[in-house]
């Protein structure tokens, strides 16, 4: 049972590699077609954690040579105002991707707002049209976090066909699209969640275990099948014994590393891949908007 320690899947390095590939395609689009991909990020309110993500997304957008458009609106912004902005971004030829940072303030209907984004500019892949395309096997904009997880799984395992996969979490932004992607890859997929009876036993079936429950340290060593590949989607801000704020995943990393064959760390795992996949989706959206084929291997 006690292994020598799992291979740590370096999401930070993989993400840097992916961003480098995106940057190469962006440069080529510019020289060959005079086109620069544009990504608009809309942030409503002052959530400090959200502000950090938006800043690093903005920086990486510029680093790969894309144009970043940032729209910061006050927390009390009316739904109609936000919908009007999205309408403008939908028809702006310099904007190829639109991301509306979630969660939105309580007085705004998230489904309505996501539904207002043009599906071909929906780089988050949250629009029902993209969810439906993914579920029916059509070309879709795929949500960035599950896409990043899939890339790490392929890197670690190669062909995923026939593998036993368990996804813990059933959110629209991670759990459900992750399950769809793994199904498409030929996995046998179980979606477990907070109501699942005997979660540890269900998790122990998994050759591929994706933890996306949003509960720090939920997954223990005994939950893990020896030799499994573990993808930790949790990004939880916790205060440690010394009163320091730190990031921790949904998996007890130290213990799980003794049982798993491969595991993603937090930070430095899924998070950086999420942002790199966002840029890859924006690149693909730009290519399609100009009637060009989307580069191979950068999206699902
Ligand atoms: N429409 C929408 N799309 C999103 O993709 C979206 C969103 N809303 N709302 C907020 C969450 C959160 N999110 C993260 C992405 C990267 C890191 C990331 O790169 N984290 C670093 C650490 C960053 C740190 O130190 O804080 C890591 O895990 O290594 C974290 C969180 C995207 N989100
Ligand atoms: Mg849940």
Image (tube, helix red, strand yellow):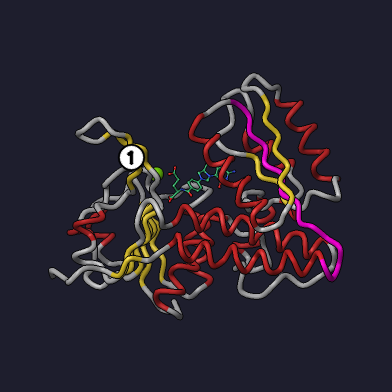
User: Residue 167, image x and y in percent?
Assistant: 39, 58
User: Residue 295, image x and y in percent?
Assistant: 69, 72
- Extreme residue toward the top, this view: 76
Q: Nearer the viewer, residue 168 or 33?
A: 33
At x 81%, y 64%, the residue is 30
Determine if residue 234 is in view. Answer: yes
Q: Is residue 226 left or right of residue 134?
A: left
Q: Is mark 1 within 8 Å of ligand 1?
A: no
Q: Quadrant of the N terminus?
A: bottom left
Whether 7 is drawn above or below 242: the answer is below
Q: Which residues are magenta?
A: 31-45
- Badge 1 density bin: few <14, some 14–19, many ≥20, Cα 10 Å: few
At x 49%, y 59%, the residue is 178
Q: Nearer the viewer, residue 197 or 74?
A: 74
Secondary element type, mark 1: strand
Whether 74 is drawn above or below 120: the answer is above
Residue 272 falls within the magenta-colored stretch: no
Residue 36 falls within the magenta-colored stretch: yes
User: Residue 120, image x and y in percent?
Assistant: 75, 55
Image quadrant where residue 5 sits: bottom left
- Extreme residue toward the left, this view: 2
Determine if residue 132 is in view. Answer: no
Q: Is residue 198 left or right of residue 39?
A: left
- Residue highlighted by disc 1: 246
Q: Nearer the viewer, residue 38 or 30?
A: 30
At x 63%, y 53%, the residue is 125
At x 63%, y 27%, the residue is 108
User: Residue 121, image x and y in percent?
Assistant: 74, 52
Q: Quadrant of the C terminus?
A: bottom right
Q: Nearer the viewer, residue 119 or 236?
A: 236
Image quadrant where residue 165 sits: bottom left
Whether 239 is drawn above or below 261: the answer is above
């Amino acid at each position: 049972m006690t292994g020598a320690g799992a291979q740590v899947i370096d999401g930070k390095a993989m993400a840097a590699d992916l961003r480098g590939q995106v940057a190469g395609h962006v440069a080529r689009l510019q020289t060959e077609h005079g086109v620069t991909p544009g990504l608009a990020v809309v942030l409503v309110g002052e959530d400090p954690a959200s502000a950090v993500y938006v800043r690093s997304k903005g920086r990486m957008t510029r680093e790969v040579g894309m144009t970043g458009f940032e729209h910061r609106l006050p927390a009390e912004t009316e739904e109609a105002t936000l919908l009007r902005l999205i309408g403008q971004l939908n028809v702006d030829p310099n904007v190829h991707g639109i991301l509306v940072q979630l969660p939105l303030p309580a007085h705004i209907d998230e489904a309505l707002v996501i539904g207002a984004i043009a599906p071909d500019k929906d780089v988050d892949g949250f629009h029902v049209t993209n969810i439906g395309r993914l579920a029916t096997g059509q070309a879709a904009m795929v949500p960035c976090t599950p896409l990043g997880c899939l890339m790490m799984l392929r890197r670690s395992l190669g062909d995923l066909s026939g593998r036993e996969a368990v996804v813990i979490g059933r959110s629209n932004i991670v759990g459900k699209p992750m399950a769809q992607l793994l199904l498409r890859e030929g996995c046998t997929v179980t979606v477990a969640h907070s109501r699942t009876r005997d979660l540890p036993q269900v998790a122990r079936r998994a050759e591929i275990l994706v933890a996306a429950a949003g509960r720090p340290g939920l997954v223990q060593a005994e939950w893990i099948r020896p030799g499994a590949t573990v993808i930790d989607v949790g990004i939880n801000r916790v205060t440690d014994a010394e009163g320091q704020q730190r990031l921790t995943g949904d998996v007890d990393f130290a213990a799980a590393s003794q049982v798993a064959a491969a595991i993603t760390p937090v930070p430095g795992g899924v998070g950086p891949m999420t942002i790199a996949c966002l840029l890859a989706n924006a690149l693909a959206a730009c290519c399609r908007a100009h009637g060009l084929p989307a580069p191979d291997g950068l999206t699902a």
